[in-house]
Image (tube, grey):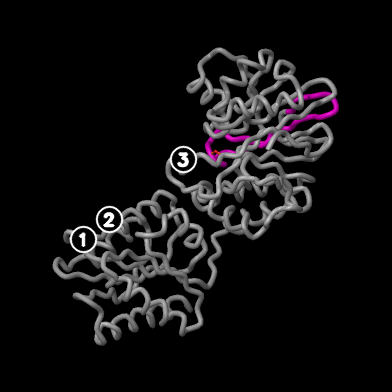
């Protein structure tokens, strides 16, 4: 996909990444991801907003050259310095010789730590404006979306908001760039995963940014990952605000690991018992599903039932790994039920409880411990756990 006109004087010059397997080396991007960069051709000056992953530098420069000569660019605005947006920095500076780099003070500091001193910088604060002639670009500080240096750029003429990571999504753009043409269901699912994996740790800053832009007339929303929103620019903003609000849905997750199907049998029993109660339940085997796909369900679930086999007298490592993701992403407190099974080494319910408490989660009783395969008498213990879970959910 080459350059694309978004509105008068404004062009997408980004790229689609279908090469990388893991975003940030952590998150599967089975459906790819886009790195959006933009050119605004003002009546007097030209600005490039953000760049792309280093691997795609040549493609970026070729896309820019379809719209303007790189040597004509006056301002290289860096909303965010993470290398998925700044990786082409040196390639851009080499060609855009007169461009001044525009970012927040910490953005310029970060850029110098990556790319050295050999560029001219302009630091901007909240409300500062850069004049392109007819287009005037106003800067809005948006710290922690998703690094501390981040800014948004707002074009007062086109009323386009360039929000970088905020309101972005996984999923590359397959020839359909605008929200009026896209498969909304697909991108909403990928957006929730992107939000949970990348942004949710900073939910309070999403709410602050939402307050800041609530009265801003936005005709076009241009994030740096995923589609551009011209028909309904508030749609991704409202989704981000909803997911950041901390409001849970009437939903229970079962998250478990299983080596020889014995824990799987217990998880199936738990799932069916919860379904009988008419509660929305989703079940994930961490041996088969990456945490990237579980976190989006976790952020708005009310409760989790966690199941682990015993492994070397400890918690099963894939469960420990999942809990590490929950900790790092600062998922807010959820109610946890616990079941475990073992052949030898039987203290893991306590180990799981301690780990859950350490990461701020509440554990309800009874924790269920099953020796060998699940038997009829074990089902009574699980039923008691589920009854208690419902009591807590209804409080
Ligand atoms: Fe898309 Fe935080 O970088």
Of pointers 1 and 3, the one earlier in the residue sequence: 3
Specify the segment rendered in magenta: 129-153
Magenta highlight on residue 149:
yes
Disc 1 under 8 Å from ligand 1? The reply is: no
Question: How far across and down, in percent of the image, does residue 382 sit?
Answer: 32, 80
Dot 2 or dot 3: first in sequence order is: 3
Relative placement, left or right, of 267 versus 109 is left
Give the residue drawn at x 53%, y 66%.
248
Q: Is residue 113 magenta?
A: no
Q: Which residue is at a point 66% across and 37% down the rendered structure image?
A: 152
Asked whether the residues under the numbered discs 1 and 3 touch, taking CB atoms below 8 Å apart as contact, a structural biologist would say no
- Near-viewer residue (126 or 157): 157
Relative to 352, is 274 on the left or the right?
right
Residue 217 makes an appearance in the image = no
- Against 93, residue 210 (above or below) is below
- Residue at point 38%, 52% (across, down): 327
Q: Which residue is mark 3?
A: 24
Q: Please name the residue that numbered disc 2 is placed on.
A: 317
Q: Quadrant of residue 287?
A: bottom left
Q: CA distance from mark 1 to mark 2?
A: 8 Å
- The residue beneath circle 1 is 311
Residue 50 sits in which quadrant?
top right
Q: Quadrant of residue 130?
A: top right
Label 1 crowd (10 A; few <14 / some 14-19 / many >=20): some
Instruction: Determine the quadrant in which ligand 1 lies.
Output: top right
> Residue 211: x, y in percent?
67, 49
């Amino acid at each position: 996909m080459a350059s694309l006109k978004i509105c008068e004087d404004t062009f997408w010059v980004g790229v689609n990444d279908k090469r990388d397997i893991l975003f940030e080396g952590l998150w599967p991007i089975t459906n790819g991801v886009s790195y959006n960069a933009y050119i605004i051709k003002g009546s007097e000056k030209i600005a490039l907003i953000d760049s792309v992953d280093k691997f795609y530098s040549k493609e970026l420069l070729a896309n820019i050259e379809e719209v303007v000569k790189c040597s004509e660019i006056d301002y290289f605005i860096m909303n965010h310095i993470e290398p998925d947006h700044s990786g082409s920095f040196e390639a851009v500076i080499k060609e855009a010789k007169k461009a001044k780099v525009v970012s927040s003070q910490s953005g310029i500091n970060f850029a110098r730590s990556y790319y050295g001193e050999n560029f001219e910088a302009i630091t901007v604060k909240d409300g500062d404006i850069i004049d392109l002639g007819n287009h005037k670009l106003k800067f809005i500080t948006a710290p922690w979306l998703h690094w501390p240096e981040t800014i948004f750029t707002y074009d007062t003429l086109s009323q386009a908001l360039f929000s970088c990571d905020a309101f972005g999504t996984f999923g590359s753009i397959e020839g359909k760039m605008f929200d009026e043409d896209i498969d909304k269901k697909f991108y909403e699912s990928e957006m929730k995963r992107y939000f949970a994996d990348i942004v949710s740790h900073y939910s309070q800053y999403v709410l602050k940014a939402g307050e800041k832009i609530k009265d801003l007339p936005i005709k076009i929303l241009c994030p740096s990952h995923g589609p551009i929103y011209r028909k309904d620019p508030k749609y991704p903003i409202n989704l981000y605000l909803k997911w950041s609000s901390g409001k849970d849905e009437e939903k229970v997750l079962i998250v478990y690991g299983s080596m020889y199907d014995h824990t799987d049998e217990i998880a199936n029993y738990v799932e069916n018992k919860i379904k009988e109660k008419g509660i929305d339940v989703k079940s994930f085997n961490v041996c088969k599903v990456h945490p990237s796909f579980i976190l989006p369900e976790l952020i708005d679930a009310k409760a989790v039932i966690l199941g682990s086999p015993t492994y070397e007298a400890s918690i099963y490592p894939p469960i420990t790994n999942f809990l590490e993701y929950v900790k790092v992403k600062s998922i807010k407190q959820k109610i946890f039920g616990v079941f475990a099974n073992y052949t030898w080494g039987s203290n893991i319910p306590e180990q799981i409880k301690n780990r859950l408490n350490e990461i701020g989660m509440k554990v309800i009783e009874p924790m269920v411990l099953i020796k060998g395969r699940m038997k009829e008498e074990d089902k009574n213990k699980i039923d008691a756990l589920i009854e208690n879970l419902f009591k807590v959910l209804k409080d």
